[in-house]
Structures are given as C-alpha cells and as structure tokens.
Image (tube, helix red, strand yellow):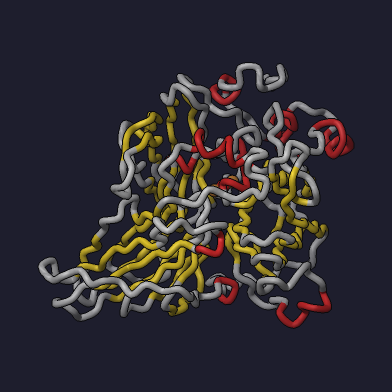
Amino acid sequence: AATVIYDFNISWVTANPDGLSKRQVIGINNRWPPPKIDAQVGDRLIVNLLNSLGDEDTSLHFHGLFMNGSTHMDGSSMVTQCPIPPGASFTYNFTIDQPGTYWYHSHTQGQYPDGLRGPLIIHDPKTPFQYDEEIVLTVSDWYHDRMSVLQPHFLSKYNPTGAEPVPNSALMNDTQNLTVPMVPERTYLFRIVNMGAFAGQYVWIEDHNMTVVEMDGVYVHPKETTMIYLAAAQRCSFLLKARNETARNFAIIASMDRTLFDTIPPSLNPNVTSYLLYNTTAPLPSPNLLDTFTPLDDTHLRPRDNIGILPPPDQTITLNISMSNLASGANYAFFNNITYTPPLVPTLYTLLSSPNLTTTLHSTIYGTYTNPYLLPHNSIVQLILNNLDTGRHPFHLHGHTFQILHRSAPNAGPWSWSDNNSEYNHKSPMRRDTLSVEPNGNAVVRFKADNPGVWLFHCHVEWHMLSGLAVTFIEAPNILQRTLKVPDDHWAVCRGKDGGRSVP
Ligand code: C2O
C-alpha cells in the first residue's frame, strides 16, 4: 500500500461553469473545479489543508469512507473537529479499506455549494468485473449567488415556508460543454457522483444501456437499466459497452428532480446534456428531454457479497422528520421535534474529556440540541424514518453503510409492521450510505455499530442541514476514550472552542 499525499490550499477563485454568471467559488490550489482524489484500497491518504479563504472557516469530509479508528479525521465541523479558521492548516491522515466511488466536500455548514467538493475514487486491484477504461462524471446543481447571500434569507422570517433557493442550472463535470470520446466496442466503467447541494438528478444515455455494478461503494450483482436516480451525495458506477458506431454521437442527460423545487423559474433549464462522442465531425444530436422518469429502484439491487440481513436490532430508533416555524418566524427542520444546533465544543472532544459519559449523555454533557444517541459497541441499530414532510430527503449516515430493509412509496405515511410486512426485505438487503426517502413516506434501515466514533446522520440537502435536520450517533464512546489520540494540529485550530478541555 502507498501513501498518497495531497496539498490543498483552499481559496476563493473566479469561475463561470454554466457560462451564465461569473462568480467567486472556493477553489483548491488556485483552480476550480477541485481536483479528483485517486487512491487504492489499503492506501494511506494524507491531505494537508491550508485555509486561505480569508473570510471563512473550512473543513473536509470524505463522504462514504468509514474512517475506522479515525473518527477525528471525518471532517464534520463541531462534531469531530473544530472548523479550520483562515490562515490555519490542518492535516487529514487515515487509511482506506473500501473500494468504490466517493467524494469529498466541506463539512462546514453551508459551504460546499460554493464549490468546495470533488470526486474521490478508491481503486480496487481486485475489481470483480472487467472494463477497459474508467470515466468519472459528476453531476451538480449550481447557484449563481454565494451561500453567504442565499443563506440569511433562507433561514429568516421572510421565508416562512422554508422554500429552498432553486438552483440556477445543472452541471456535468462542472461544465455544460462535456464530450466523452468513445472507442467502438470498448467497455467503460462510468462512475457518477451527485455533488449537488439540493437536487436529485435523473441520468440516462440515449440508445445505451447501463449495467450498474456499484452504489455508494457497495458492489452489487450487475443490473441493467436505462435510467438511474442519484439524490444529492449518492454515487453509482455502471458498465457501458460502446456501440459499434463511427457515424453518430449520443446525448448523456442529467435532469434535476423538479418535484423538489417550490417554484420553477421560466429561465431555469433543469437539464444538462453531454455527449458520447463516436465521431468528432458528426453533429451533436438534440437531446430527447423527458418529463416523467422511471429510474432503477436502488432498493432492488443486491450486494455482491451476499452478506444477508443483520440480526434483529438491539435498539430501534424512530426518527420523525418534520418542518415548522420557530418563534423567529423562520422555518426549521426537525428529527423528533429537535432541530440540530452545532455545539460550542466539537461533540467528539467533549466526549474525550468527559469522565462519566454514559450517565450524563442525554442531559448535561451535550444538551438536547445535538440530538445525541448512544450506540453500544457492536450493537445492531435499526432506524425507522418517518418522513412527515412533503419533500424527498436523502439521508446520509457517516461511518457506515446501512441495510435498506424497507422503503415505502410516496404518501404511505409512517411505518408500521402490519402495513409493510410483505415488502420488508428479509434476504439480502441493499446497503448504501445515502438513502432517498419519499415525501410523506417511510424507510427502515439497519446497521451494526462496529465503528467507534461520533457520526452524524443527516439530510444531505445542504439547506436542510442548515435548518437542523441532523442527529448525532455516539458509538462506543468508552473505546474512543481509551484509544483515540487526536493530533496537536487538530486541537490547535480550536482556539478556545475546545472548551479549555484539550486532552493532553
Ligand atoms: Cu457528505 Cu455529512 O456528509
């Protein structure tokens, strides 16, 4: 295994990815889009970060990586680290034991939609399928305004319905002018990442089938489809055999999920089209755009490792999701009537310096506003997600994948055994790290708490993160207290935010 080192100097740069509006974006080493990170299973990844933003704190989260034994490298601001202030540096250093398609992004609230996000690919010397060439495609919604402009209005009494800002456009590989050269009859592995802040994306390729082989880092038994849906933060890879074609080109279309938007401005083009280029001199076809979509159901996929369903849960946590107005008149989001508010000291650091953790967990240490749940080591945890809201929410769990035991259709209401028993997935449930839950629908997921750490579970719509749709899982805290060593440069960026309790 190798040590892979990236030096990231984070600063504002100018970009105009949709050609409609030049704006300040957060770049890396004076460039935007941010680079792709490549590593191999077993490698150590080191990212030396320097914050040169001048006006904002920052952090990096490596979405989907388990961070086994290194929860303090998970990158969530005020959960596993202090945000990195302007002028400061910070090193992420961890080993990787999972192959697949991931991404990295700022985990400082409201920041990654300003551009601090990129693909992270973990290559597998033992990939269980054959292909000739790999192509990474990112899809993303895009805003013309900075988050510092959008955010104050979004969370104010002037937006009492909590209407999320509607993106101005969609991007593929951070542009709207992408062509992908094709060699006839070659087999390509496409890795697609939705790095968007809000919109799910339907993706299809004209006159080509996609054979899905991986989702969120989980290899699956190959499944052929004509369309996939990727909610914000989800990833998928599929094999595509190039046609025996030298005369024509074909459109790749990503279409934002418009059902998420409160209004659809007439100026909005929800689609972005790229092309499979078989012939550089032939015209690019006009894409056949759609209004109704029939994507592959991700819950019908089967993990290739055939692990089978986990044992019955030791703990079942029901999480009811709702939106409502606080006294300020602003609209907030709630799990069980609690809206997440970041603590003053990162939850992990509080935990490392608390002698009597378990007894005081729910009362004095954390307060109620981080919505903490204690998960004993190696216990089986089941989450029942009742989405009482009218929006579709992509829920993401840090540090794990979860088995999807059930996901209802839209408007099925809260989950109950009697309603859903027949659909309950008993055999070999699909696993992933981000699951899209339907409007007024429900889902049941299960995982094993085999990774000591402090892990967020949250909606990956960045607007809903800002409005508090998150809970904190505190997994095996006694093991963390005994074994975890947080390096000095992590404590150093706290500057008082460690509550004066820095662990020696
Ligand atoms: Cu993609 Cu909490 O993260």
Determine whether, in the image, residue 41 is placed left or right of residue 390: left
Q: Is residue 444 visible?
A: yes
Q: Residue at 44% x, 44% y: name it.
A: 117
Task: Return the residue nearer the eye: 8 or 123.
Answer: 8
Residue 353 at x, y = what percent?
A: 75, 26
Q: Residue at 70% x, 45% y: name it.
A: 332
Give the residue furthest to the left: 281
Residue 319 at x, y = what percent?
A: 77, 56
Task: Return the residue nearer the eye: 46 or 268.
Answer: 268
Q: Is residue 452 visible?
A: no
Q: Quadrant of residue 180?
A: bottom left
Q: Is residue 293 above or below residue 123?
A: below
Task: Return the residue nearer the eye: 393 or 391.
Answer: 391
Q: Residue at 41% x, 68% y: name it.
A: 203
Residue 440 at x, y = what percent?
A: 71, 66
- Quarter of the image with the C terminus in it: top right
Q: Residue at 38% x, 45% y: name it.
A: 37
Residue 182 at x, y = what percent?
A: 21, 68
Determine whether, in the image, residue 116 is placed left or right of residue 435: left
Determine whether, in the image, residue 207 is placed left or right of residue 402: left
Determine whether, in the image, residue 57 is placed left or right of residue 250: right
Q: Is residue 23 above or below residue 66?
A: above
How many numbered marks, from 0 up? 0
